[in-house]
Image (cartoon, rainbow, N blue to C red):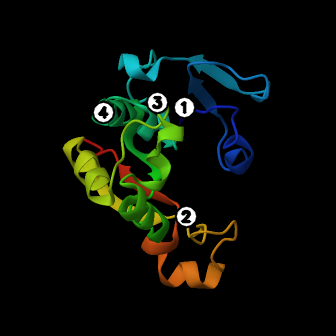
Amino acid sequence: MDVGCGAGNLYPWVRSRFSRYIGADVVKYDAFPTEVEFCRVDLDSGRIPLAAGYADVVTAIEVIEHLENPRGLMRELVRLAKPGGWVIVTTPNQLSLLSLLTLVVKQRFQAFQDVHYPTHLTALLEVDLRRIAAECSLAEIQIDYSESGRIPLTAAHYPASLSRWFPRALSENVLVIGRRPRT
């Protein structure tokens, strides 16, 4: 299940790994794949109208920062995951070199400047993601990074080999993954 799916851009990456893909969002974009399921939801309302334990994997890719209540979203993602299922959430990495430099210079994180408001509402750090995941009873919580990030003051990205050595500092995105307990 892809919560906050947008145009369904995750689908091509996962379709060979899963027998079913369900996208959920406030609007169904014209580019959304016609061969998969769609569920219209207002994520700020707090409830996705699907049964508990609905999916083996529930994702929210670059969604949580758009919402007023990130904990509410995480609780809902966990509710939708089957016991033993996975929850995956990504968001802009506020601890990247670019974001920290932007904070020092402009007093705002990179992805939360005035041009991003009001779409980017909630800046979350790695520690916030860990705490929220633990509060929602996820187990086997892990943090990972995209290993892709822009070099400050340029349009260029860091070489992949360098990003692998310093993933927190050189990645634009952070990911938290956890498993819903079986009992």
How many angstroms separate mark 3 from mark 1 (CA)? 16 Å
Q: Reading the chain from its start, which is encountered first: label 3 or label 1?
A: 1
Q: Secondary structure at mark 1?
A: loop
Q: Reading the chain from its start, which is encountered first: label 3 or label 4?
A: 4
Q: Is residue 141 left or right of residue 14?
A: left
- Disc 2 marks a residue whose amino acid type is Ser
Q: Reading the chain from its start, which is encountered first: label 1 or label 2?
A: 1
Residue at the disc numbered 2: 146
The residue at the point 42 percent across, 39 percent down is 64
- Disc 1 marks a residue whose amino acid type is Gly
Q: Reading the chain from its start, which is encountered first: label 4 or label 1?
A: 1
Is residue 57 visible in this depiction of the protein? no
Residue at the disc numbered 3: 118
How many angstroms separate mark 1 from mark 2 (CA)? 19 Å
Q: Residues within 10 Å of mark 4 (few under 14, many from 20)?
A: some
Task: Locate residue 4: give its quadrant.
Answer: top right
- Disc 3 marks a residue whose amino acid type is Pro
How many angstroms separate mark 4 from mark 1 (CA)? 15 Å
Residue 21 place in picture, x, y as percent:
64, 34
How many angstroms separate mark 3 from mark 4 (CA)? 23 Å
What's the mark number on residue 4? Answer: 1
* Quadrant occupied by the C terminus: top left
Task: Locate residue 87: give its quadrant.
Answer: top left
Residue at the disc numbered 4: 75
Dots 1, 2 in contact, CB < 8 A: no
